[in-house]
Amino acid sequence: MLVGVIDANESHRRQVAQALVSFYQVATYSTAADAVADLGKRPLCALLVDQSAPPRGGGDFVRLIRSGNLFAGVPIVFTGTGDENTLRHQAAECGADCFLAKPFRRSLLIRAISQQINKTVEKKWEALPAASRRALVGTMDVYNSFSDVVEKGEPVAYAQVLSACGPLVEAVGMQEHKEILASIRSHDNYSYAHSLGTATLLVLFGYAIGLKDPDLSLLGSGGLLHDIGKMSIPYDVLNKADPLTPEELTLVKSHVPLTLQFLGQSAELPKNLLVIAAEHHERLDGSGYPRGLKGSELNELSRMAAIVDVFCAMSERRVYRPAISAEAALSIMVEGMSSQLDQTLLALFREMLLDTGR
């Protein structure tokens, strides 16, 4: 997923590239001519064009694109400084899909690009039952806000996370989890899709073992927050098709302490939410990370989180591989990971999915 950025300001190009580091591949250019020469040969998912783009400004370049076959169908985000209403008019007049007024927060940039790329996917959300629709829209908005937490070291607004997870708990309670999981399957933001999938199945698991609110909301919030450290890991590493080098594997594993570092800015977060973030990669035989915990060192919540995280990772598509079926994922977990995952809880998880037709 490649995003092209055309902006005369070198500092701003660097800032945008860094802001998008874990979400997309990014190619930056100081002039429209440089972008055309390079991007004309590469598949592109979105363009950010600044009003300052040489030689005659971003507006002229966008009009040129829209009048011909160059970058046909590629969504364009127009950026610039000054009055917001003027910028809105400039963007509409030249044919851009949306605009962002500088300076903008990282979350607004990510949301603007994601909205354009996922127009078709998110449009279908409007036809879903009310609770499922609110769960998807609310969790998407709050998930994007986590990027500001990562970038600026701001505390997570836990009240907002709980509010976003309220409709999720409601929807899962009404057996609408299948609609939610299906609705994120084609979303371009794999980290969001994985986090919401994990949150959804953790809530479903909670219902299955008889939990009530506020424990169900805590499970949903934990699933949504458990991987935010990945927002500091480059896209090319997270989505690498070839085996990771030892250095890259160490970098990927660092998302757990990074997540805990970011969550540690918020004194209001419940301890059990931090357990989900800290221990979802731990394994009963001690082969997990980051601490190599094993056996009785892992409580029931840690074991549940590990099962759901593994299942979601296997059953979701990735840039480098297609998804595998739920049945195949469960078979691998039962037969190939018997020493790593709690088999009693896994049997309950499997029965739960079969009963609900996942």
Image (cartoon, helix red, strand yellow):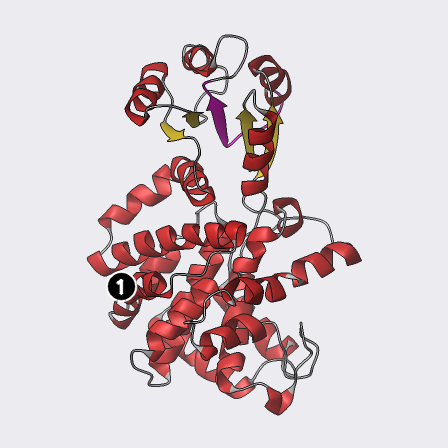
Amino acid tagged 1: Pro
Q: In the image, 288: left or right of 83?
A: right
146 up-or-down from 23: above or below = below
Q: In the image, 142: left or right of 261?
A: left
Q: Which residues are magenta?
A: 41-51
At 37% from the left edge and 65% from the top edge, which residue is drawn? 158
Inspect this view and state whether residue 244 appears. no
262 up-or-down from 58: above or below = below
At 50% from the left edge and 32% from the top edge, which residue is drawn? 45
Residue 238: percent from left, percent from top = 62, 51
Residue 50: percent from left, percent from top = 48, 22
Q: Residue furthest bottom?
A: 296
Residue 259: percent from left, percent from top = 56, 63
Name the quarter where the N terminus is drawn: top right
Residue 199: percent from left, percent from top = 41, 66
* Residue in the foreground of this view, choosing between 11 and 115: 11
Q: Residue furthest top?
A: 56
Q: Which residue is mark 1?
A: 167
**SS under mark 1:** helix
Q: Residue furthest left?
A: 130
> Badge 1: how crowded within 10 Å, few (<14), some, or many (20+)?
many
At 41% from the left edge and 10% from the top edge, which residue is drawn? 67
Q: In the image, 350: left or right of 243?
A: left
